[in-house]
Image (cartoon, rainbow, N blue to C red):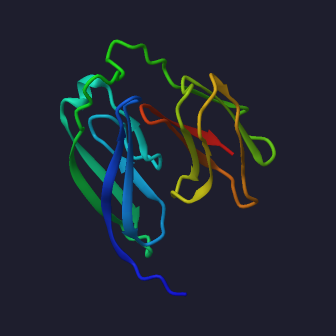
Amino acid sequence: MVVKEAPLQFASPVFNCATGQLTLRTTGGNGQPVEYQIPTLSQGWTTTNQFLITAKQAKKGLKLNARQRRGSDMGFDKADLDYDVPSCPGARMATETEPVSELTVSVLGNPVEGKTVIVEIRGAEGFPLHMQLTDITGRLITEQTIERAASVEIPRLLLDDRTSGMLLLQVNTPLKSKSLFKNA
């Protein structure tokens, strides 16, 4: 079976008025992972397609961005969408005054011994959590997603036999992200 590439574009986002969760959806593309960004909500790009919208943010239009690495590794194909969050009469949404704990990420052991990176993550409780480990050239070594994080997560990320040198660990939730450099 042959699948033809189609331009990457946004499908209608899904917004949950009760929780304030916005789920981004795309169509087309070339089969490579899609990364998302909402400049007013997120720091950098993430492969997590879910974002939490507060009541204050819901009153403003949002610029949704998506990108996908071209098959030739030469840049990105991009899509964007201007999105107005639907009004939700009577629905309770998160407010700016609700406390949001800081996302803390600690790598246990430096340099890494063996072929496992052990990470301790706090501050992502209740949210989807995505981890991506790459080398300094951007080569993906491993990634892992936790659908709903506990108050403390201690995931183990496996390295391949070719992995050595400096690594970049990116940890993302819909609201926060952290990046760490690590010696392997």
Q: Residue at (29%, 22%) from the top-left corner? A: 90
Q: In front here: 73 or 131?
A: 131
Task: Classify the position of the N terminus by image quarter.
Answer: bottom right
Residue extending farthest to the bottom is 1
Residue 35, image x, y percentages: 41, 53
Look at the image and tell me whether residue 111 can be seen: no
> Does 123 sit above or below residue 181?
above
Q: Which corner quadrant of the image does residue 17 belong to?
A: top left
Q: Can the viewer see residue 25?
A: yes
As drawn, is 51 to the left or to the right of 116? Answer: left
Identity of the residue drawn at 69% across and 46% down: 184
* Depth order, front residue of 127/132: 127
Residue that appears at 31% across and 17% down:
96
- The answer to whether residue 35 is left or right of residue 128 is left
Where 5 falls versus 98 (above or below)?
below
Q: Find residue 25 and report its image quarter.
A: bottom left
Q: Position of residue 44 (x, y in %)?
A: 37, 42
Q: Position of residue 39 (x, y in %)?
A: 28, 40
Q: Residue at x 44, y 74 (%)?
A: 71
**Where's residue 42, x and y in %?**
35, 37
